[in-house]
Amino acid sequence: MFRVFRSEHYDKKLDKLDKKEKIIISRFEQKLKKEPFSGKPLGYRFF
């Protein structure tokens, strides 16, 4: 399993969201930990 890190800037933006949106983001982060290569690539090699 992979790890997901949050930056200070990300945490500040996350705090401004309501509870429902925080739950959605938390689920997304958990899914990302289990399946890090799912979804559409960003398109840049250095990412």
Image (cartoon, rainbow, N blue to C red):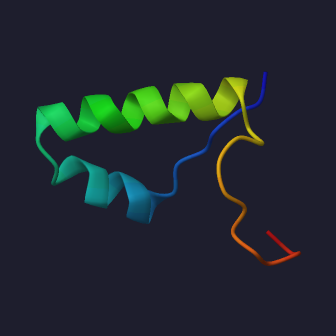
The residue under the point 31% across, 33% down is: 24
Residue 7, position as x, y percentages in the image? 51, 57
Horizontal side, residue 47 vs residue 31: left or right: right
Q: Is residue 30 above or below residue 29?
A: above
Relative side of 46 to 17, left or right: right
Q: Quadrant of the N terminus?
A: top right
**Side of 20 where 9 appears, left or right:** right
Among all residues in the image, which is located at the extreme right? 45
At a point 62% along the width and 35% down the height, the residue shown is 32
Out of 43 and 21, give the one closest to the viewer.
43
Measuring from the top left, give residue 30's x and y in whole percent: 54, 25
Q: Quadrant of the C terminus?
A: bottom right
At which x and y percent is residue 29? 52, 34
Residue at the location (63% across, 39% down)?
4
In the displayed orientation, state which residue is furthest to the left.
18
Residue 10 in the image, given as x and y percentages of width and height:
41, 58
Q: Does residue 36 sit above or below 7 in this rendering?
A: above
